[in-house]
Amino acid sequence: MGPVLELRKVVKDYPGHRAVDGISLSLERGRFYSLVGPSGCGKTTTLRLVGGFEKPTSGEVWLDGVMVNALPPHQRDVSTVFQSYALFPHLSALENVAFGLRERRVPDAVKRAQDALARVHLSTKAASKPAQLSGGERQRVALARSLVLEPKLLLLDEPLAALDPNLRGQMRAELKALQRSTGITFLFITHDREEALSMSDELAVMNAGRIEQMAAPESAYLQPVSRFVAGFLGPVNWFGDIGVRPERIRLTTVPGEEASLQATVDSLLFFGNSIQVHVRLNDGPRVSAEIPAGSQVFREGESVWLSWSRADEMRLP
Amino acid sequence: MKGRGLGVWAALTLVFLHAPLLVLVLFSFNSSRFTVWEGFSFTWYQAALADPQLAEGLLNSIVIAAFASVIATVIGTLAAYGMWKRPATWLAGTLYLSLLTPEIVTGVSLLALFQWTFRYLNLHLGLYTVIAAHVAFSVAYVMIVVSARLRQYDRSLEEAAMDLGATEWSAFRRVTLPYLAPAVAAAALLALVVSFDDYVITSLVAGVDSETLPMVVYAMARRGVSPILNAVSAFVVVVFGALIVASQRLQES
Amino acid sequence: MTLRSWSLLPVRLVATVLLGAPLGIVLVYSLLTRGDYGGVEFPWTAESFTRLLDPLYLGILWRSLWIATSATVICALAGFPLALFIARSGRWRNLWLQLVLLPFWTSFLVRTYAWIFILRDTGLVNTTLLSLGLIHKPLPLLYNDGAVLAGLVYNYLPFFVLPLYATLERLDGALPEAAADLGAPPWRTLWRVTLPLSKPGIVAGSVLVFVPCLGAYLTPDLLGGGKTVMLGNLVQNQFTSARDWPFGAAVSMVVLLVSALLLAAFLRHRTAQELL
């Protein structure tokens, strides 16, 4: 079987600016994908092009081997979980989930909607209106409402952004488990690098309407193809053309064997599981290093040596 | 200016706003025909009910207001929805202008239109010209009330409906319309009131067989004060008050 | 056709046939000649507009402007303290606001009639004063400019209070406190902080009162008793008894133009959009 979604040189222009600048990508069945980038990079527009809410200026959108450029949203076998969840305020949780089934005149709509609610652990809230549900519960109803239709592709538009931080962590695991158990392809939109790195099988980093890199999280993080990708996915210290991540920098009181620089400790920030050490090189620039908590104690003003292994260098001119 | 002075001033202004109508309602129950309180009675209400002209005017007003408000509500709601989908600047401008055009100008312009049309058609002024005129000036009121509710409407709700398989029309009917229902009802009540109340435009485009309640009231007021008119006024004040309070409750819900 | 085009179809029809076309016809009529038996005839002429410069009609124009201006000023003087009071009355705000609006929603005709009931020779005021022995013959309260002014202020005061209240309500409560903290007494705070900041509301209220007063017809008709002729009455008169449609049309156009210009100027104000 071919890819479930394929974008071919898709461009979307709005009056005065180009939101999507020639994107091509291909998604395989049953995997978890993320589209990650800063706000305004075109990721939400890309999602809306796939959902059918916008028409591409040029290029083609293929869903499961069919060119769908001209198809309206209700004829596309994809479903969207909106950032605001977009639950229908006048309908109960159950009726929200049954909405799409009724539109398709599925005979046992209520039964299937109940099953879908059970799957997201919300059977007890079936009769509640959206206004009576918590943020996390609304999120689950929105998921159930889309998943019950068994779409070929589920689009998620920053669905965790509105949740409080604790719940967000929990929902990450839940979303990933849900993707694995349903086997539906997820395309997850986020501006949060941690979400993209932790949840995806593969992620695409977007910048200014283009995809800069599409790769597995680990390789994108360790072998970024551009300074933008390197910087977006995590902090980097730049030494000319060479970038080194803070957690890869070793701090010692004596010179190391490989690349070695002398510096003075400026400040220390304690994070519980790690310590951020800000140092100033003797010739001026500042560098930050992240070391495990409890490994070694440095003091402000102390003189240290920085080193790292060649393998951890990112060479990006 | 602070504190008590402000409160006294506000109270006086509110008295100025309410006293005239309260006095009018009070004296509608006066047994005397003069502006001196003699005793409580329903005399003038009975007289008003027995007046054939008032009865005919009321009937005409009810028929006109019912037709005009239903038509204006349908058109105005659809208009608000269409403009919410994508703004229509000229159309909105025309509707706002209609709100701000002095009534007398609206009235004579509609009269001119009808007279001009009648040169080619064998028709004359009647109930339907009044209904058409009332639709013309109440559509804007409906549009404003419904638009206000649409402004707080999450666009992704319709998108979600279509995403789940609903056609544009089905999304409107199953999601947007239920959301708008209270505002539509409020707008309909408002249209009912502005239609029922209009004198200036109506008097210009009404035919001989389509005299409305405000036209009868106007004629009586022109002739001088009649205690019957106090009773009619009190009735109108109470009915309008109830309709408007209902309309505002709906808008707030 | 999309759903949007369908939904806008009826209103486009109404806007074209019942709103646009009538004004177009009036514009055309204003440039035609009066027919021998009423109606209009060719040729084209601007005579109806030049006739407006006749001292008689300039007088009416002047009187309309004067009355509308006076009504606006009185509304401002009465409305500002009221709006300020409501804006500062905490959780009672909505109740006060409803009280201001309630009479406004009862019939315009009835509200105007109420003033006949109060002001006429045998009305409430004169009857009361006579029975108290304070006067010996009725005061001429009705059918003059004063009565018209009272009716206009009464009818349109809520138009001033509402936008002004909206502005005052949004005024940061800490600003007057900051002014007081910096040593300004209440009067100076009002003058130097509250008043300047409420300017958008005052402008909005003034336009919303002035425009309908300028084109008023029913109030001067009923309370002015034919003596106080304003532009609205002139229009009505030309279309009915005088049967000079071109002239009535020309006056209509002038009233409409002045109203539209004022509103356009007001809408260009950035704050206008926020308030409406």
Image: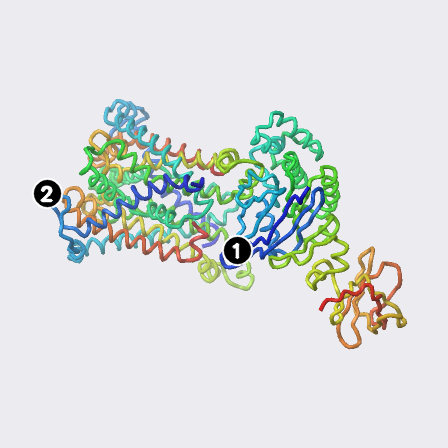
Q: Nearer the viewer, mark 2 or mark 1?
A: 1
In this rendered view, identify the residue nearer to me: B59 or C161: B59
Of all residues shown, which one is farthest toward the left?
C36
Please state the horizontal and vertical placement of residue B166, each as a whole percent of the image: 54, 35
Numbered tag placed on residue A13 in the rendering: 1
Q: Is A219 rendered above or below residue B65?
A: below
In this rendered view, identify the residue nearer to me: C232 or B4: C232
* Callout 2 secondary element: loop
Q: Which residue bears the numbered disc 2? A: C37
In this rendered view, identify the residue nearer to me: B33 or A246: A246
Please state the horizontal and vertical placement of residue C50, each as a whole percent of the image: 17, 57
| Residue B44 found in image quarter | top left
Q: CA distance from mark 2 to mark 1?
A: 62 Å
Q: Do the residues at pointers 2 and 1 share their chain? A: no
- Badge 1: few (under 14), some or many (20 or more) residues near its Cα, within 10 Å? some
Please state the horizontal and vertical placement of residue B169, each as a whole percent of the image: 48, 36
| Residue C265 found in image quarter | bottom left
